[in-house]
Image (spheres, rainbow, N blue to C red):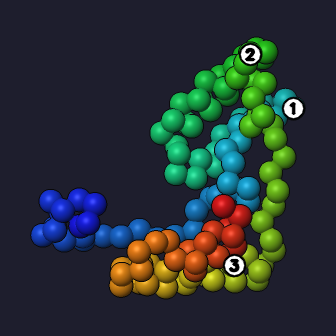
Amino acid sequence: TRLLPQTAGCRIDHAWCGVLGVPRDWCTTVGLDPATRIGWAGGYVGLGVSSSNLSGRTLTDLVLGQDTELTRLPWVNRKVRPWEPEPFRWLGVHSMYQLYRIADQREAAGLGHTSRLAALADSITGH
């Protein structure tokens, strides 16, 4: 309510939390397998409105076999680093959630800046 005081009396009915399909380096990728002609685009990490438009145009050029500024962008057919194997991935995700939860509680209690715990959680995610 500090940022949007007009929401002071509003109730929040739902909250979302879950594991996202996030690439390890948090970078979007677009590609086309020349053998199968299967294309992909993803890893938007919360920037999907603008990134999906650009990746769609990039994918169109790839499918049509055009050499354009878009098909020469570094996100095209780039190698994505895999996530750590289980149980390390599970431990990392749940540690991150817990750190963010505690950081949110501390910040809500009056800590005037981003908690160091949130910074630690960011480092776990690679973000």
Measure the C-alpha gap from mark 3 to mark 1: 36 Å
Task: Please give the residue where the numbered disc 2 appears in the rendered image.
Answer: 68
Instruction: Give the answer, above or below, for where 119 lies relative to 26.
Output: below
The outermost residue toward the left is 9
The outermost residue toward the right is 35
- Secondary structure of the residue carrying tag 1 is loop
Q: Report whether residue 87 is seen.
A: yes
Mark sitting on residue 67: none
Q: Are marks 3 and 2 in contact (CB under 8 Å)?
A: no
- N-term mark: 1 or 2: 1
Of residues 119 and 100, which is closer to you in this image? 119
User: Which quarter of the rendering shows the N terminus?
Assistant: bottom left
Amino acid type, residue under disc 3 in the picture? Gly
- Secondary structure of the residue carrying tag 3 is helix
- N-term mark: 3 or 1: 1
Q: Please identify the quarter of the rendering in which residue 92 is found.
A: bottom right
Measure the C-alpha gap from mark 1 to mark 2: 20 Å
Q: Foreground mark, 3 or 1?
A: 3
Label 3: how many Cα within 10 Å (few below 14, some 14–19, many 20+)? some
Left/right of residue 92 with respect to residue 79 in the rendered view:
left
Amino acid type, residue under disc 2 in the picture? Thr
User: Which quarter of the rendering shows the C terminus?
Assistant: bottom right
Q: Report whether residue 36 is seen.
A: no
Task: Please give the residue where the numbered disc 3 appears in the rendered image.
Answer: 92
Task: Please give the residue where the numbered disc 1 appears in the rendered image.
Answer: 35
